[in-house]
């Protein structure tokens, strides 16, 4: 049956090389992953089925293995001849000689790093797990072993996940029975997978997301107060409300993502998934930051519209008073002339005496306290000032002070976010330092010295954050 399958493969697939009759009955590759590079160990079993050229296979085969270094080659035959060419891509040449029906096992062992990428302490393998194949393949098995304490994240294409020696292992087991798998083996096996200490990263991201949500709620509350102040003063608050709604929606989404992150981070939960917890928490943090930005935009726009509205009102009052002033000071040459003689003059004296009488009566009324009581019952602020310039000064001094307070609060919130980012970077540095110690690339003494420095910076940054938060809280109390 097995020979029938092999001959079926040879019959259905086109020959793409001159090494007719040679095929791989088994190819096993194990990648032991690290944070700077990875170790690859390959076992390839060749079998010769014979060809028109004869029953003896004698030819060179080669493997291209990227930036492979420290290459070791082994085989079942002691007199195996091979060479390794280190260039842009490492090429391994092996001379194979064996008869029809015989098998030869070749082993390769090397270190490699060209498919490894790292971003935000998350490592990724992106490339061909098996390069493009020169021969017919009967079976291929590829394994990826994560470092101790690491978990796999997003993986494509999907792979079977198991635990071996307390390490997560991904396995791709491919056979030629399925035409798609045959094609995959022939064209190479492209993979993209992530691995990191997602449980630790997720815990940090969850705490950071909680803090950013707290900031978002504070910014949203500030925007809400500004919108309340704008009601009745700003004619069109639709743009302000639109920004506020966007901020509110994003904050709700951030809270939902945080809830999912907390569920996924719980090892006792049926939905436990460290890498999903990490990404949900990261999404929550980004959403809450977006909510804060939109809330601040809404608050700033509301304050700007309030100020513009007040300026327009005062400008209108100023214009009306100016018109009255110009009308009262109209030149006498523009007044209509009357030939009535003394009567116009007498009328003027009567008017003057009447005005003086009104002023005297008003002064008596004011001294008696009646004026003050009447004034207190009215809401108009214009009469409390003797000049429009004084009105402007009085109105905007308090408003500008409040606006400055709001701006200062925004600056403090920005400083808090910057300090938190600094703290995150320091925590990542500390994590890298721990990995360096695990790989024995640094002595315990040097590790302790560096860790003490980073711990000190983290504590100082935490203290700065606490101080800035305290100042922000005091500012909020004053601004109420």
Image: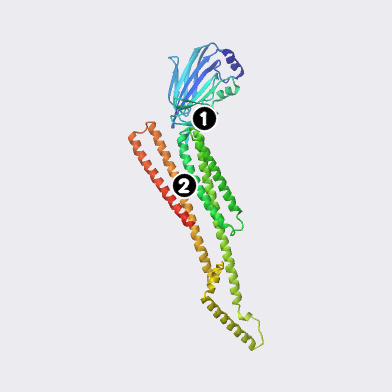
What residue sits right under mark 1 in the picture?
Answer: 127
Q: In the figure, 163 relative to 323: above or below? A: above
161 vs 101: above or below: below
Q: Nearer the viewer, residue 477 or 247?
A: 477
Q: Which residue is mark 2?
A: 417
Which residue is depicted at the point 58% across and 64% down?
313
Q: Sequence order check: which comes first, mark 2 or mark 1?
A: 1
The reply to whether residue 68 is visible in this rendering is no
Q: Which structural element holds mark 2?
A: helix
The residue located at (55%, 78%) in the rendering is 362
Under circle 1, the secondary element is: strand
From this view, report whether residue 383 is shown above or below residue 48: below
Figure label count: 2
Rate crowding at label 2 as few (under 14), some (14 to 19) or many (20 or more) other CA atoms within 10 Å: some
Spot the residue most to the left: 445
Quarter of image, res 176: top right
Residue 412 location (% of width, % of height): 46, 51
Q: Is residue 51 left or right of residue 68?
A: right
Q: Quadrant of the N terminus?
A: top right
Image position, residue 395 (x, y; %): 52, 64
* C-alpha span from label 2 to label 1: 37 Å
- Percent from the top left, x then y, of residue 215? 49, 48
Q: Nearer the viewer, residue 315 or 91?
A: 315
Q: Is residue 251 visible?
A: yes
In x, y percent, where is residue 159?
53, 27
Q: Residues within 10 Å of mark 1 (few under 14, many from 20)?
A: some
């Amino acid at each position: 049956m097995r020979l029938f399958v092999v001959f079926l493969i040879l019959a259905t697939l086109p020959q793409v090389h001159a090494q007719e009759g040679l095929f791989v009955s088994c190819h096993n590759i194990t990648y032991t992953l690290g944070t700077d590079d990875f170790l690859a160990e390959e076992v390839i079993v060749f079998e010769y089925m014979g060809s028109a050229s004869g029953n003896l296979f004698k030819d060179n085969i080669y493997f291209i293995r990227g930036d492979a270094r420290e290459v070791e080659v082994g085989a079942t035959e002691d007199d195996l001849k091979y060479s390794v060419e280190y260039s842009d891509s490492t090429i391994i040449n092996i001379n194979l000689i064996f008869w029809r029906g015989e098998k030869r096992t070749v082993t390769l062992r090397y270190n490699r790093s060209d498919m490894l990428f790292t971003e935000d302490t998350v490592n990724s393998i992106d490339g061909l797990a098996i390069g493009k194949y020169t021969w017919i393949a009967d079976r291929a098995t590829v394994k990826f072993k994560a470092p101790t304490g690491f978990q796999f994240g997003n993986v494509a294409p999907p792979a079977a996940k198991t635990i071996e020696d307390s390490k997560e292992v991904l396995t791709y087991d491919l056979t030629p029975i399925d035409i798609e798998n045959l094609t995959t083996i022939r064209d190479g096996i492209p993979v993209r997978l992530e691995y990191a200490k997602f449980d630790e990263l997720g815990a940090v991201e969850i705490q950071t997301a909680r803090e950013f949500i707290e900031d978002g709620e504070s910014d949203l509350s500030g925007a809400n107060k500004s919108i309340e102040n704008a009601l009745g003063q700003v004619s069109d608050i639709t743009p302000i409300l639109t920004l506020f709604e966007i901020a509110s929606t994003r904050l709700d989404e951030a809270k939902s993502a945080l809830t999912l992150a907390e569920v996924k981070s719980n090892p006792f939960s049926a939905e436990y998934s460290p890498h999903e917890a990490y990404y949900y928490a990261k999404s929550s943090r980004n959403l809450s930051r977006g909510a804060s930005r939109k809330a601040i935009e809404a608050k700033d726009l509301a304050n700007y519209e309030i100020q513009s509205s007040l300026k327009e009102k005062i400008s209108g009052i100023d214009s009306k008073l100016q018109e009255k002033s110009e009308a009262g000071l109209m030149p006498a040459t523009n007044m209509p002339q009357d030939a009535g003689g003394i009567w116009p003059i007498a009328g003027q004296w009567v008017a003057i005496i009447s005005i003086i009488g009104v002023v005297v009566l008003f002064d008596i009324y004011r001294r008696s306290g009646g004026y003050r009581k009447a004034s207190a019952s009215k809401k108009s602020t214009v009469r409390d000032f003797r000049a429009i310039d004084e009105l402007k000064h009085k109105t905007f001094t308090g408003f500008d002070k409040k606006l400055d307070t709001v701006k200062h609060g925004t600056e403090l919130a920005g400083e808090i976010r910057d300090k938190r980012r600094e703290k995150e970077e320091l925590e990542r540095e500390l994590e890298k330092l721990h990995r360096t110690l695990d790989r024995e690339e640094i002595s315990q003494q040097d590790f302790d010295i560096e860790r003490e420095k980073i711990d000190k910076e983290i504590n100082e940054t935490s203290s700065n954050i606490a101080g800035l938060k305290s100042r922000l809280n005091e500012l909020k109390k004053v601004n109420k």
